[in-house]
Image (cartoon, rainbow, N blue to C red):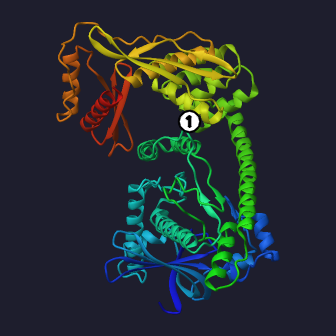
């Protein structure tokens, strides 16, 4: 590698604190040579210096709609330390060699000098990729190919990684959905995100191998976090839902996971599905990265490490606490802003036309007032039954105050949930995350009704030192029985009449021969044959179309007893087949 490195920067069009540059090449054996160059901030900012104390007090650059509040003075962040084109700058380079299967074969960390050949914005990338004559075409083409391969591999290995090129939607390291300002930015954003994740991962492994105390970036799941496959299905649902509902998916995902934190020991990173991870690529913008630079820089120059393990622990605690305080302050500000908007909608009688997100805010505001809900809200709520975000159902059922109209809405909700009992389980999931409830305990048994095997279930829960218990319900599947018991349990907790939850199970004599589902056949016909052999009611199918008229996405819902399953596809027949197949899986695995 030459003493003077080359590279390019790719950032948001408004960015002036450019602290990372990239270079990508193909190796002789068909692998990849990647160099991520990070401006040498630790050269200017040493431990306990005035600038170090300033950075520690701010911990990070704060971004706003119309600007930012930098962690470091602008004369440094935007000028002296920033990797402007045609200016030689000292950098810490993460030099990585990848095999053809993208495994890291070698990582070198070195302090050197680089010159940026170009300052590109995210929105420049699509234009460059369509112009073979552009001076940066070859590099951007390689970087794009590598980034997509890295993203695909991370998804295959279980990372919560997803992006929607057409809508400018991406996930961050923790799997939270982010909406880019411009959809044309997506490819450039993915290039930089994937190469920075690769560099941070390589530095974490390097620190472990060389026993260098650094701040690791840890992200853990909660005890009730769903399986990775279910989380990915939730993230992928954003491709077929209206944009107004994306915030609901983002909030739901956020509630399912713990917040990421820094620490001196490795706890793993759930969102990335990595054993060890750190932050190293943004020392201008994040104090954690600056501290890691100070440590790594000293190591590669054979100097004493500036921070001991005990000091790293203290710094981690400080940053984590500051993040909590900053997030709390931001949350309070956003809440008040949302409540003011909700108050305006109420005063101007615009509740009925509110988006799902705004309707949720209106619901929270009215509950906070601790009065009975106004008639306009009551009417709008009744019209939305069956289409309400599940969080609104939880708010009205479990958090709304006493009042005649609130009570009538609870009754209506229970009746609606009785037709879709899986929603009751979702409400208990939300109550666990928001109200701190324990999940219900289910007692399930297998029994026979008229030679027909069925499942019985009873649920119980303790809330505020009071134990509630449902009646016993039966269904053709274990899942269906527990869902019915959950609806009853909700009504019992609320002290309201239990809605009609009877499941029609035909007691006609069945054949003594064991009847199985032929999974090798078309799932629609296989399910129909199973019902006929068991003398059961046939499943019913309903359809819903979403997306652009020219390219709709059909969602088919298969209803069998009290169990439902869904399938999504570009045509109705395929969606129906997928829904039937999912129902077969429920019957086979749930039995």
Q: Position of residue 447 (x, y in %)?
A: 35, 14
Indicate whether 227 appears above or below 535: below
Q: What residue is at 66 percent from the left and 29 percent from the top?
A: 349
- Extreme-bottom residue of the structure: 3
| The quarter of the displayed image where residue 526 is located | top left
Q: Position of residue 2 (x, y in %)?
A: 49, 92
Q: What residue is at 73 percent from the left and 29 percent from the top?
A: 368
Q: Position of residue 401 (x, y in %)?
A: 71, 21
Q: What residue is at 71 percent from the left and 51 percent from the top?
A: 327
Residue bearing mark 1: 356
Q: Position of residue 20 (x, y in %)?
A: 57, 75
Indicate whether 391 appears above or below 313: above
Quadrant including the C terminus: top left
Mark 1 closeness class: few <14, some 14–19, many ≥20 residues within 10 Å? some
| Of 203 and 5, the residue lying toward us | 203
| Of 264 and 93, the residue lying toward us | 264
Indicate whether 237 appears above or below 137: above
Relative placement, left or right, of 70 versus 356 is right
Q: How many marks?
A: 1
| The quarter of the displayed image where residue 276 is located | bottom right
Indicate whether 194 appears above or below 251: below
- Extreme-right residue of the structure: 50
Q: Secondary structure at mark 1?
A: helix
Q: What residue is at 17 percent from the left and 36 percent from the top?
A: 520
């Amino acid at each position: 590698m030459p003493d003077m490195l080359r590279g390019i920067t790719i950032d948001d069009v408004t960015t002036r604190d450019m602290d990372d540059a990239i270079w990508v090449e193909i190796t002789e054996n068909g692998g990849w040579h990647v160099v991520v160059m990070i401006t040498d901030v630790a050269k200017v900012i040493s431990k306990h210096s005035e600038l170090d104390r300033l950075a520690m007090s701010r911990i990070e650059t704060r971004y706003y709609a119309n600007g930012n509040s930098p962690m470091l003075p602008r004369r440094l962040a935007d000028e002296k330390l920033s990797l402007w084109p045609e200016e030689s700058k000292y950098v810490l380079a993460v030099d990585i060699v990848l095999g053809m299967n993208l495994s890291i074969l070698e990582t070198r960390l070195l302090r050197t000098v680089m010159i940026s050949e170009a300052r590109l914005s995210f929105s420049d990338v699509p234009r460059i990729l369509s112009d073979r004559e552009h001076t940066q075409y070859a590099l951007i083409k390689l970087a794009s190919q590598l980034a997509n391969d890295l993203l695909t591999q991370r998804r295959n290995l279980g990372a919560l990684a997803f992006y929607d090129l057409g809508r400018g939607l991406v996930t961050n390291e923790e799997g939270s959905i982010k909406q880019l300002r411009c959809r044309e930015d997506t490819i450039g954003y993915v290039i930089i995100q994937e190469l920075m994740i690769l560099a941070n991962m390589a530095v974490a492994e390097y620190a472990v191998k060389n026993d260098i105390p650094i701040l690791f970036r840890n992200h853990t799941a909660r005890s009730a976090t769903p399986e990775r496959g279910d989380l990915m299905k939730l993230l992928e649902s954003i491709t077929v839902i209206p944009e107004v509902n994306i915030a609901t998916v983002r909030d739901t995902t956020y509630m399912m996971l713990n917040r990421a934190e820094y620490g001196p020991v490795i706890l793993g990173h759930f969102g990335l599905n990595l054993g060890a991870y750190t932050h190293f690529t943004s020392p201008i913008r994040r104090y954690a990265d600056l501290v890691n630079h100070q440590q790594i820089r000293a190591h590669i120059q054979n100097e004493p490490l500036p921070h001991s393990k005990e000091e790293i622990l203290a710094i981690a605690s400080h940053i984590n606490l500051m993040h909590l305080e900053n997030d709390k302050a931001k949350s309070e500000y956003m809440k008040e802003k949302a409540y003011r908007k909700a108050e305006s909608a109420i005063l101007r009688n615009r509740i009925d036309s509110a988006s799902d997100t705004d309707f949720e805010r209106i619901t929270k505001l009215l509950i906070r007032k601790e009065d009975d809900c106004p008639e306009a809200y009551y009417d709008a709520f009744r019209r939305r039954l069956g289409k309400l975000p599940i969080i609104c159902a939880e708010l009205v059922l479990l958090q709304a105050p006493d009042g005649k109209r609130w009570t009538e809405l609870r009754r209506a909700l229970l009746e609606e949930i009785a037709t879709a009992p899986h929603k009751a389980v979702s409400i208990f999931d939300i109550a666990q995350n928001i109200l701190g409830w324990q999940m219900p305990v289910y007692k399930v048994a297998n029994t026979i009704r008229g030679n027909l095997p069925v499942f019985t279930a009873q649920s119980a829960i303790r809330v505020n030192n009071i134990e509630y218990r449902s009646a016993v319900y039966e269904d053709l599947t274990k899942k269906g029985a527990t869902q019915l018991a959950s609806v009853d349990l909700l009504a019992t907790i609320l002290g309201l009449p239990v809605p009609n939850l009877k499941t029609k199970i035909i007691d006609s004599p069945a054949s003594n021969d064991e009847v199985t589902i032929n999974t090798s056949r078309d799932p629609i016909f296989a399910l129909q044959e199973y019902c006929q052999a068991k003398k059961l009611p046939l499943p019913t199918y309903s359809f819903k179309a979403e997306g652009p008229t020219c390219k709709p996405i059909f969602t088919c819902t298969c209803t069998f007893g009290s169990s439902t399953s869904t399938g999504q596809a570009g045509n109705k027949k395929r969606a129906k087949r997928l829904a039937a197949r999912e129902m077969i899986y429920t019957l086979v695995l749930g039995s």
